[in-house]
Amino acid sequence: RDPRCHLVLPDWDVERMMRFLKVRSFTSFCYGRPGDGNLWNKLFEPPYGLPDELLEDEAFLWEGSRQPTAPFNEHREPTLTYVNAYQLYTSRDFAAIRAQYHRVYRDHFQVRPHIAARLSEATNSFDGRFMIGAHVRHPSHLVEQPGHAMPRVDMYLERIRSLLRHRHLPEESSEWGIFLATDQDRVLARFQDEFGDHLTAFRGFRRTKAEEDQRFDALPATEQAREGNQLQHLVAADSESWSTAMAEEVLLDALALSQCAAVLHVVSNVATAVAFMNPGVEMELLLPDARP
């Protein structure tokens, strides 16, 4: 609604990001590398019906534009991301904000066909079933949570079973399922043990491995509660590991979560995106002191 704007164009070129931020590397960005071009084109169709090549044209993207004054958008949307999202989720205006952002998402975001095909293959079993989405983040993400506390996996399991009881769905029924989005191999294994064939999750995604989690578990609490232990930091530390494949993985998890009836989550940019992708999803924020 800014009268000065007639187009909003995404410029996700890694080289230009580095130039703008005046850095030679990243500590937490690992979703593409210099030379990949505009990463938007790897994930989404160009907005406004533009041809792909115009989103690679720096002169076109920036003509008549100016650099943002706040790289992380904290001035115009202070509750949108990171630790501030807790205020967003608990705001009385959250439903209206979800509807507003969904209109933008609906009109301007269309995933590339290869991503749509992967999503369809993973979610074709959702139809007709009560699907519960669980976004279980690595415990290192406690730095973003209110009170620096994360719900344990057991809390997700208890809440899932509570939702089933509320809907009078026996665990052995085929009328329900779970989609799991997680950044830990051990959580995927735990959910598989608990729910078996009811579980859907993308296989082969980059998640923390057992040895990485063991190193994290051995850290003192003060070290666990700091930036740098999250998956994106681990991958970003080696620039050879930067890849648009990880961007696709995050996007696919969010898209699949948005097709569930209810999503259990913590403070997370992925959860925020899911809330905007589908304003009809029941979003349930799990807090360690909450009761199912």
Image: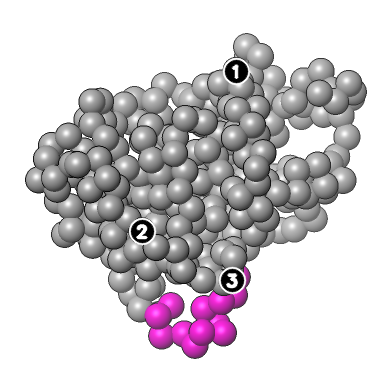
Quick check: is 226 in the magenta stretch?
yes
Task: Count residues near mark 3 (Cα–Cα under 10 Å), then give few for <14, some for 14-19, many for 20+.
Answer: few
Where disc 2 sits, the SS reads loop
Q: Position of residue 216 (x, y in %)?
A: 43, 77
Q: Residue at x 57, y 64 (%)?
A: 145
- Kindly report the distance in space between the C-alpha atoms of the residues bearing marks 2 and 1: 37 Å
Q: Position of residue 37 (x, y in %)?
A: 62, 35
> Decide: marks 3, 1 in contact (CB < 8 A)?
no
Q: Residue at x 44, y 39 (%)?
A: 282
* Residue at mark 1: 107
Nearer to us of marks 2 and 3 is 2
* Residue at mark 3: 147
Amino acid beneath label 3: Gly
Quarter of the picture containing the N terminus is top right
* Magenta segment boundaries in residue numbering: 216-228
Amino acid beneath label 1: Asp
Q: Position of residue 167 (x, y in %)?
A: 25, 40
